[in-house]
Amino acid sequence: MFCASRQTIRRGRTAYRLAFPTLFIFTFAVLAGSPHLARSAQEEYHLGAGDVVWVLVWKEPDLSQTVVIRPDGKVSLPLIGEFPAEGRTARELESAIAAKLRDYIRDPVVNVIVKEINSSKIYVIGKVRKPDAYLVRGSITVVEAIAMAGGLREDSRGNKVIILRNGKGNSSYKQRIELNLKRMMTDEQSGQVRLQASDTVYVPD
């Protein structure tokens, strides 16, 4: 399993050149920007340990606060206590918190805003020019991730790319997703396969 120290983690630039045996494809990944995610990005981003979220309960200032997701994937909230947050999107967390609060208040309206992303990194390894771990903001595609790693190496001949994804919670199970890289580059819908935090993108021989 590929490991990278904090010093080796690099931020992606806004544009990268992706080499392929018969053609060059340019792809742009918007990875920097505001410390707050846009709403559309929040709906796709899966929260992780170390992320900072603002939980806002309408007309309930005592229940509204900024919290950090702990290493065990939970947050501590008034009334409902410890609550699992890791692996959920902001919208999913809103719904779950609101469901719990219905035991205490009538018709709670909850908003969750992602203030800081401290857990979102992906790994790109195998036949790429710069295999490494990369910090990203928001959601990126597999093609964009390969571009971040400098594109395919010249000796890359295959079309297969593999995504290794962590199981839910503390499970050591790794989900394996095999994709056709050439198809993702030529088919718009296939090329929109998006990564989750801590995914590993592996380009084999």
Image (cartoon, rainbow, N blue to C red):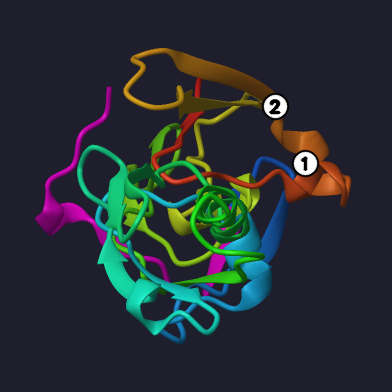
Q: Which residues are magenta?
A: 1-18
Name the amino acid, label 2.
Answer: Leu
Question: On the image, which quarter does residue 44 sit in?
Answer: bottom right
Between the residue at mark 2 and the residue at mark 1, the CA separation in whole angstroms equals 8 Å
Do labels 2 and 1 touch, CB within 8 Å?
Answer: yes
Label 2 residue SS: strand
> Would residue 28 be visible to someone looking at this image?
no
Q: Identify the residue shown where x is 45% and y is 79%.
A: 60
Q: Position of residue 195 (x, y in %)?
A: 57, 45
Residue 6: in magenta span: yes
Name the amino acid, label 1.
Answer: Met
Locate the N terminus and report the quarter of the image it occupies: top left
Q: Position of residue 72 (x, y in %)?
A: 23, 37
* Residue highlighted by disc 2: 179
* Residue highlighted by disc 1: 184
Q: Identify the residue shown where x is 38% and y is 27%.
A: 169
Residue 88: in magenta span: no
